[in-house]
Amino acid sequence: MDLRNYLKKRIYLFFLVPPLMVLTVFLLIPLAILLQYSFSTHIPGQGLKMVFTLSNYLRFVTDKYYLNGLLITLGTGLLVVIITLLFAYPVAYLYSKASFRYRGLLLIMLLSPFYTNVIVKIYGWMVILGRQGIVNKMLINYNLLERPFEFLYSYIGVIIIMVYVHVPMMTLLLIGPIQNIKDSWIESARICGARNLDVIKNIILPLSVPGILSGAIIVYTAVIAAFIIPLLVGGDWGKRFISVMMYTHINVTQNWAFASTIAVILIITSLSIIITFSRLVKSMKVGVLVSEKFNR
Amino acid sequence: MAFVEIKGLKKTFKNLVATDIDHLEIEEGEFVSLLGPSGCGKTTTLRCIAGSIEPDGGSIFVRGREITHVPIYKRKLGLVFQDYALFPHMTVFDNVAYGLRYRDISKAEVKKKVSEAFELVGLVGFEDRYPHQLSGGQQQRIAFARSVVYEPDVLLLDEPLSNLDFKLRKAMRFELKRMQRQLNITTIFVTHDQQEALSLSDRVVVMNEGKIEQIGTPNEIYENPISVFVADFIGSTNIIRGVVTHCDVAKGIYEVRLSSSPTISIPFKERVKVGEEINFIIKPEKIDLGRTPRGEHAVEGKISGASYLGSAFNYQIRIGELKLEALDSQVDYRNRYEIGDSIFLTFDPEGVKVLRR
């Protein structure tokens, strides 16, 4: 009887088995292999040789080319997160204040980009931003430019498309927390003497932090890992992204060992950045509000 | 000029008149309730004063200053919401101190004023907690403290008690009145609960379909309702409609043919004409019940429902088609009437009122 009760109480463990198995087979084991590769060496013509060496890591930290690549990638992640937030926040706010009818329309508009493949989206933007594209033509027509501006194969192009790709996700993650902000909080602040800017600074922004945090983390990781966008529209700039370097080492030089090293370093740095960032935000005590605990 | 004055205030939502107030004056330090059923415009009126709703017309004065189009943050008012609306991400101290941020005062002064407010609401020692760590009643007190700490001209209360359970609500009623007295702050209180309105207010404003139906002290409103609507809304009362068929001026007895049942005799002090169709208001506590007729004008009825209230019995009585409610406070539990018992009613002339509209 005791055993039965014991098992009954722990029945949930049984349901954890399938996801744990999937995670082990498709994530933990590959990660372990990746780690092993990163300490092995590559012999041109022969491929991977399983030894234990730190030479890959030494190469990474002594070569400015790779360190710069890492810095550029991480910096771009931050830049894209900030610009994406600036675009997504007003949309999310509008959505949470919109009437029921417009919400449906807005939601369809927000979700529709998810049904398109990233590569299709990139080529779409290439048509728009190209030398003969609509943006350049308009700017020239209105005499704002004399000759076409090179959006493509430059850093700006990468940023524009990365922001475009990630705005819908960011918006969706912001909507929840913003919707939880009650009008009566805003009205109370106003009657206490707060002007619009004060209300945004003291009430709306702090209460949006959970959404901003989750949105920022998800977009940041996605941007850091993205290699198709810099590869296709980055031109020479694109090659300076660490993810593209990784891609070249696998596909061109076939140096799996060094590619694995880059991957391990990227995972460790981005993880530590995310953890530090969320610790920092939590220490600002904005996380306390989470709605369920709050009385009505 | 009165401390608060509202003139010709009007607001419509999509052809629906929400508020249409000709004139309302409130004196300094007065506690005035806006009372009415949901949709009567009491909340809209309050929001117009607060500034969160722009009225279509009319003007609002506070301390002789017109505030109708003054931005909400410059109005110097306090507002307590039904859901308290405490900022969840701030400590209770910061919540109370919030309004002081926008007044030009030193940090030490802020601390002093906030601790005075905590003393007023009896929550000293709770300063560092967050709103979700407090009970409903405590949150309500903090909301009150937040609204009065910066000494607003007028305190607006939007059904602040209706989220509390019955016992707490009764206790908070006394508390609210005590705090309001102590601060002597002019207060406008919106409620749909007539008991709250009667027990708290200096004056009650009964509203119906956007308009003011009656203004008066709680006693005036209760004893002398000017319309059937007020009488019906203010208290459980019997409203009987009928035509006067005969009157005996010497005895002060009128015979009334009811629209719903045979003719009955009703005593009262006011003069009415034979043939006039009027409404009678008979308070349940002013009906005398007995197993035998007392006096020649007793009316016979049947008990159709009885409920024991502890301090009194509430009976439902049928006279033909007419249903009456009577409150018998001389409780003798063993001698109580049962459903189906025949009974004789005598009306106390003091408890009978005539209403022509």
Image (tube, coloured by chain):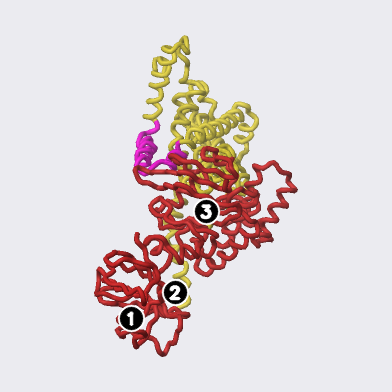
Chain colours: A yellow, B red
Q: Foreground mark, 1 or 3?
A: 1
Report the amino acid beneath label 1: His
Q: Residue furthest top?
A: A146
Give the Cα separation between the discs numbered 1 and 3: 52 Å
Report the amino acid beneath label 2: Arg
The one nearer the camera, A46 or B236, is B236
Report the amino acid beneath label 3: Phe
User: Quarter-wise, where is residue A104 in the image?
Assistant: top left
As for residue A111 lying within the magenta part, the answer is yes
The one nearer the camera, A233 or B66, is B66
Residue B332 picture location, percent across and down = 44, 87
Q: Foreground mark, 3 or 2?
A: 3
Tag 3 residue: B81
Q: Residue furthest front?
A: B250
Residue B219 position (above or below residue A292) = below
- Alpha-carbon neighbours of circle 2 within 10 Å: few (<14), some, or many (≥20)? few
Residue B27 position (above or below residue B174) = above
Tag 1 residue: B297
Q: Pinpoint the chain carrying mark 1.
A: B
**Residue at image x 45%, y 52%?**
B42
Position of the C terminus of chain B by quadrant: bottom left
